[in-house]
Amino acid sequence: MKLKRSLNLLDVFCLASGAMISSGLFVLPGLAHAKAGPALFVSYLFAGIMAATGMLSQAELVSAMPKTGGDYFFVKRSMGSAAGTVDGILIWFSLSLKSAFALVGMAAFTQLIIGWDIRIIGVALCLLFISLNIIGVKEAGVFQVILVTGLIGLLLFYVARGFSNVNVQYFDNYNPYGWGAIFSTAGFVFVSYGGLLKITSVAEEVKDPAKTIPLAMILSLIVVSIIYGLVIFVTTGVLEPLEFDVTLTPISDSAGIFLGNPGKIALSIAAILAFISTANAGIMAASRYPFSLSRDGLFPGFFSRISKRFGTPYIAIMVTGFFMIISLFLDLYILVEAASTVLILTYMFSCLSVIIMRESKLQNYRPKFKTPLYPFIQIFGVAGFIFFLFEIGKDAWFISFILVTFGLFCYWFYGRIRSTRESAILHLIERITARELVSGTLETELKEIIRERDDIMKDRFDKIIEESIVLDIE
């Protein structure tokens, strides 16, 4: 049973934007300002440039293979089942934890308004999102559009009112810690751009995905990068540097200075909208990874069950949602660092996947969007992501190692004997060594993806050609 194609350009744009405008804007700036000083917005800009290299690679891959599972699907078809299994499990955990962290992040803001227990609110919201996503991805998409529209409106109001209150003296010592601090801080805030990955995970539920998804990714990155830059600039110019360094609610604190208590409450509401939209987009995207793993025989079959009534992967959604609920009661600081590591690795894998798919010379790898300046964009991206990885803490590396080991364990003892798909890297090795290593099943699969992507219907002639043992062409 196929998933419903119900998401349009606005839905997909809001899915990515809502996932990005979250803790990366409402919580991280205070911590990051202590590392980079007034030049913080430059760190956000550099992180956005690096995210663009991965985004362009993702856009090419999804325009060629618009299948649910996104990054996992690309990595598996390019690097093999073992790498795909590890990547799918890592991203499933990282997106779930990032979404749960978004709900935990609401605590600092709800205390400013009502003071309720954040865990109770988080559990209630998780149950709401589980229900919304089971009922239908379109309904969840409409909810996402409403949230993101309100969020962007409040942030633009904040910027418009805040510009006249910027104190230029706060920018006098513009770069107190040097360029090394700016670049290392870029790695620290890179998780702010992780929402771009969530688009590709729902590719099969997007109308005209080969055109819609690349355009939505590009628009989302541009719009969110501009919002990041403007909001960080205003906040840096309004809050005193020492106060900025220690606060976990910098945007709300800044709004309180020039908008009073109503403004502080309004921006706190904006933050809550951001965290809610991230959690909603997170459960929608994360649940598609176990679904895709199961469909490929790398995870138990029940994860790929689709509701006959709603056309959604309800088992995968429920398991992902309940994992998020459990995560609400854990210490997430180190786990979020690990999630950041995985996101950086995922962008790097996307760049490598484009190189492998192109150099394998597969006839049916036909992306409708091609990354410009290939392969320089991909090489620059991989080098930059390696630099970022060196900025991540040892604890995050340790947890990531555990998750990688778990992924390999799942593949070796379950998926290895159930999945025998070819990968592009075998085609590349065959091309280099002139040895026959592949049977052509990947070419066949890519051909079927093109048919589905372009809505090409098989006629009687196509079936005759496919079933023919010999073709006599004069």
Image (cartoon, rainbow, N blue to C red):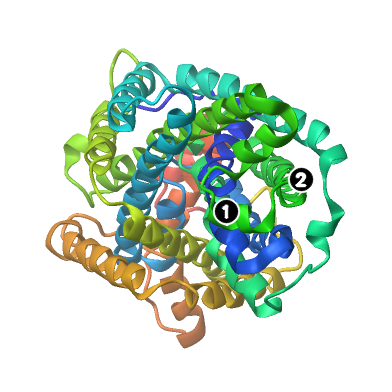
Q: Is residue 210 left or right of residue 419?
A: right
Q: Quadrant of the N terminus?
A: top left
For disc 2, the neighbor class at 10 Å (few under 14, some 14 to 19, many from 20) is many
Q: What residue appears at the point 52 percent right and 65 percent down from the top-left corner?
A: 353
Q: Residue furthest top?
A: 309
For disc 1, the neighbor class at 10 Å (few under 14, some 14 to 19, many from 20) is many
* Residue 419 image-quadrant placement: bottom left
Q: Is residue 209 left or right of residue 109?
A: right
Q: What residue appears at the point 50 percent right and 29 percent down from the top-left corner?
A: 272
- Circles 2 and 1 in contact, beta carbons < 8 Å: no
Q: Position of residue 306 (x, y in %)?
A: 28, 26
Q: Quadrant of the C terminus?
A: bottom right
Q: Residue furthest left?
A: 413
Q: What residue appears at the point 18 percent right and 59 percent down from the top-left corner?
A: 410
Please tell me which residue lies in front, 57 or 227.
227
* Residue 146 image-quadrant placement: top right
Q: Position of residue 276 (x, y in %)?
A: 46, 29
> Mark 1 — residue?
30
Residue 320 showing in the rendered view: yes
State how many labels appear: 2
348 w.r.t. 236: above or below: below
> Mark 2 — residue?
234
Q: Earlier in the sequence, mark 2 or mark 1?
A: 1
Question: Which amino acid, mark 1?
Answer: Gly
